[in-house]
Image (spheres, coloured by chain):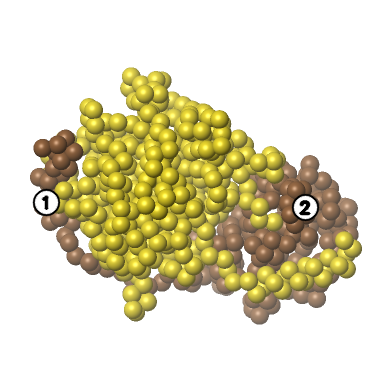
Chain colours: A brown, B yellow
Amino acid sequence: MTKRARGARLFRPCWKSLIAAAGIFAAVLPLRAGESTGPPPPGSYTLDHIQRVPAGIVLEGTRFPRALSRYTTGAITLLAFFYSYCADPNGCPLAWAAFENVREGIIARPELYGRVRLVFMSLDPAHDTPGMLRGFARRYESSASIVPWHFLTTYSNLFLKPVLRDMGEESSIDREASAGVVINHLLKVFLIDNHGFVREIYSNQSLDPAMILGDIKTLLLEESKSSGHKE
Amino acid sequence: MKGCARYVLMAGIIAAACSIAMPTRADETCLSPYTAALIKGQEAYLHVWTLGEKGVGDESDKLVTIDADPKSKTYGTVISSVSVGGRGEAHHMGFTDDRKYLWAGRLDDSKIFVFDVGTDPSKPGLVNTITDLPGKTGFVGPHTFYAIPGRMVVGALSNNKTRDGVTGLAVYNNKGEFLSEHPIPAGNGGDGYGYDIAINPKKNVFLTSSFTGWNNYMTDLGKLIKDADAMTHFGNTMVLWNLKSMQPEKIFSVPGAPLEIRWSLREGDDWAITASALTSKLWLVSHDANDEWQAKEVGMIGDPAKIPLPVDISISADAKTLWVNTFMDGITHLFDISDPTKPVQIYEKVTGKQVNMISQSWDGKRVYITSSLLENWDRKGADNEQVLRAYDWDGKDLKLKFEVDFFGQKLGRPHHMKFSGPLDKASLDTPGRAASG
């Protein structure tokens, strides 16, 4: 007998007992009636406190400095980093489309009015100046009381990089890309609770507006439960 | 570009984006679907999580990096080795979603080491050691490291009370801070055992498989197989979970320790395949005619009566073929799984005296194999070769390109492998990032 065959035989003595213990049956054992692998009902699950949003200085509309926390606390916030000339369909435009859908979803649900804000923060403060971003914000002014959409930038990379690093959203500029200047970054959309904690992060694999709206409702239910109010 | 023109451009982009279907998941065949910077060309480096060996080199567990670029002067040689101190049954690794960091676990002392592979993948650096898994969760044996956005799901193998296979999942943020725990269901047909994790984001589900606990994986194999009671303590289940809620939804009976799980990467597919180690079977998890998830046995690997012990599997990017390593006989098998309900073996080759992990490039042209399963389960004496072998696959035969003798080079026992791409100019600022503007 070869050594290999001897090695293979090592398992044999317990083989029958193993099979007996395992019980060869093709059973499927649902843990509850029916499958529930779609989006779970809002409030039926908990979102982790992934991390606190870091402190930072941002600009909106003017060069007057504001604390980033002004845009990440006091309401549920959906935040993404972008730059205005981004053209990768799997990047910023995908996030933009998802934000548009979430915005429409909120407008269709009066119970969400004034409870959620949308925030885009630029990855290119040198190009995306406050004045330049004002134009984007204007497009959504008509619904600002229902769901405001803020377009933020900052003074320079010196102010931007620490925020990106802490949020796990560092970026780099590729000036040799065939499409011109490209800012390499990983698409991440952050769902932030009233207290400034990141509670969910969506990528281009999970940027589902229906799921985002479900998560927003889950956070609202959590808040109402902790404050004793009925949602 | 003036503001007006930008609005036109952005409006066009938004319109285009709105019409774009959600992209399908993309893997480097076996990575988390959330992993960035997939290497679809030639990999530059091979990181190998290596068990230290008493009397061999510095005797410490270490992350070994091998030059995998055939155009490099140091091709096929060890270019970096980072020892972490001590021996704790080094086993598996996983990238963070941004591919900047590589988490590597030890099954004995439950330490998790975080290496920076983004700054310079040719010279990884140890940047963090996470030691709180047992204290926070009661789980021990961190095995699987599966990235989700901004976080790492850690699948454990055991617990610190009974040290059997009842265990669970822990979620950490990318900074290494513990967030939550999720026990694998024990009862209602569940055995509570864990092993691999595999997510299908499109279906909002993930699967877990089941192996065995500390009592067994830290016991000498020769002694273990003579212990009839111990041999009953192997996992016999897979669990289907709701990804969003992290709640188990369904338990499948999959006898004989189902190990690695691979979802098909082909557009439109929603099935996963696994191999059961002790029963030597391939199992398929897919929807049935009633649109319910089911697991069913679809094929045999070698001769199950000889207990070849299938260990690692690697699915091709087009989901047409599946590599399977069987540890005991040292054979690498290739199955045609273009019909996943009827896998057919189309090739096999003895690639070592014992073979465990197998990794293939995205294009399927290169295949890497390592030898070590577990320190106490590896073969003894002359059969205990500890090597990494790199092959080219031409569609007909595996052709050896290089091998690294891990004992000969005083490194240890090579186990899990991960690829890194070259450090290019574009990523000098923040390397390892995807160009996903």
**Horizontal side of residue A231 vs B227, given as left or right:** right
**Horizontal side of residue B162 vs A117, given as left or right:** left
Q: Residue at x 79, y 41 (%)?
A: A158
The circle on residue A140 is: none
**Horizontal side of residue B91 vs A112, given as left or right:** left
Q: Nearer the viewer, residue B105 or B215?
A: B105
Q: Position of residue B168 (x, y in %)?
A: 36, 51
Sequence-earlier tag: 1 or 2: 1
The crowding category of the residue bearing disc 2, from other C-alpha atoms within 10 Å (few below 14, some 14 to 19, many at least 20), is some
Q: Amino acid at mark 2?
A: Val
The circle on residue A17 is: 1
Q: Residue at x 53, y 38 (%)?
A: B69
Q: Position of residue B156 (x, y in %)?
A: 37, 46
Q: Residue at x 82, y 71 (%)?
A: B8
Q: Nearer the viewer, residue B91 or B299?
A: B299
Q: Amino acid at mark 1?
A: Ser
Chain ID of residue with mark 1: A
Note whether B92 is above or below B126 in the view shown: below
Chain ID of residue with mark 2: A
**How many numbered tags mark residues here?**
2
The crowding category of the residue bearing disc 1, from other C-alpha atoms within 10 Å (few below 14, some 14 to 19, many at least 20), is some
From the image, tell me which residue sits under label 2: A181
Q: Quadrant of residue A81?
A: bottom right
| Same chain shared by disc 1 and disc 2 | yes
Q: Nearer the viewer, residue A226 or B291?
A: B291
